[in-house]
Image (tube, rainbow, N blue to C red):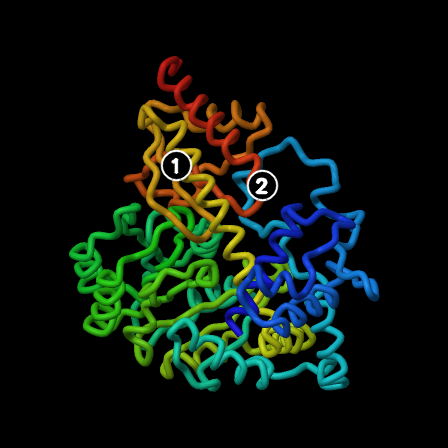
Amino acid sequence: MKKYLDILSDLEQKINEGQFVSGQKLPSVRNAAKLYGCSVNTITRAYAELEKQHAIYSIAQSGYYVVDKPGNRLNATKSKTIDFASSSPDPSVLPYLDFQHCLNKAVDTYKYDLFTCGDSNGLESLRRTLVSHLAGDQVFVKAERIIVTSGANQALEILAKMPFPNGNSIVLVEQPSYEIYMRFLEAEGIPVCGIARTTAGIDLLELEEKFRQGNIKFFYTMSRYHSPLGTSYSADERKMIARLASKYDVYVVEDDYMADLGEEPGIDPIFAYNGTSHVVYLKSFSKIIFPGLRLGAAVLPEKLLEPFRQYKRYADTSQLSQAALEVYIKNGMYERHKRKIRSQYAARISALNEAVRRHNVEGLLEIPDVRYGVYVQFKLPAKVNLERLIKRLAAKDILVFSGKPCYLSDYKEREKFLRISISRAQPEQIDEGVREIIEEVRREVKFPS
């Protein structure tokens, strides 16, 4: 199965990147089997899947050819804009045809059940499917503890508002962190405080002190592929956070929305070290499938289930979307698409790192060692005027995102940086974009007025 998925992913990538161009004949089944070192049946299966996706077509007694798609990104006029700001997925990698098939299959399978109000906990069959799906991330849980939500954001909002068994009131957030959640907490008047996190990690002694004396309800963290830093906690840090949570009766809300974009061994979530009592695990499907799908899952400790249900109340998540996601996971499409998008994004991160090595010879930028995910922090010299830098880059059609909104409004100890996203930066644009950023930073350092 793994060999088949790897071959299929490689063929898809070659077609998407134009190594196999429209109308080109693919290698014969026999030659492709020799090339990949696999059986003829494996290649036949891969070609059949590509044909089902309308990526290739077959001609009897001739072979397989790449479909000419008028809307293909490679055939379209390319934008001159280099987008390092957007965090939404690249439209060219979204699985439109696959998911359309899953929607149709869901309607055929569930029929009228999809057009009822449904269960506020989520479609039962999807929650059962998620049990085995989450186990792949070392999240072992019963279906009864999974609640399907309208994206991870809905779960985050409910958790901020609902009471917790420890009776505490303050939400502790990493600084910097997810900018939309920062603004939500402040707008709702929810008691919140910050703790510094850098690309080097977090001060565990300070964290323990806050857990001990800080009236902390829960600690919100992105343990893997953090936004906006791009880095992950070490295994020792994750184990310690799990231990401190149990020791001081403080809950951890682990937002693992980037988990599918990495494949580093031993990078398990905090939940894996404390899966029964004090960790809420949040999963989002937006970065892998479609942002507009608005589906997520919350894995909750027993003590939080009833309060969470009371605040959620309604079956407010599309039954049709849930059923389609269930089909998408069960038929292996999710796993295959995950491999595809992970590979493409990892290649873009690699290109970004190479561009930094090539152009950052003066060490003007501090860049962490990030291999997976979509974000990388570009830490800037103190004398750089961040707003002016962003405007100058925009004038050159280079879009970047300031790290300033990623902090609480009253948090003082801020780093000055750009959050660089590779999700919509095309591979052929990355080197030029990095070179221009470093050139403008150099200009700011030399002529700061």
Q: Amino acid at mark 1?
A: Phe
Which quadrant would residue 341 be assigned to in this image?
A: bottom right
Residue 376 percent location from the top left of the image: 41, 43
Relative image position of residue 390 (x, y in whole percent)? 49, 28
Disc 1 residue crowd, few under 14, some 14–19, many 20+, Cα 10 Å: many
Residue placed most toward the observer, 123 or 258: 258
Identify the element where label 2 is drawn.
loop
* Front residue (pair 200, 308): 200
- Give the residue drawn at x 31%, y 74%: 278
**Mark earlier in primary sequence (1, 2):** 1
User: Mark 1 near mark 2, Cβ–Cβ under 8 Å?
Assistant: no
Confirm whether residue 293 shows in the render: yes
Q: Is residue 270 above or below residue 81?
A: below
Q: Residue furthest right?
A: 60
Tell me the residue that label 1 is attached to: 378
- Spatial distance from mark 1 to mark 2, Cα to Cα? 18 Å
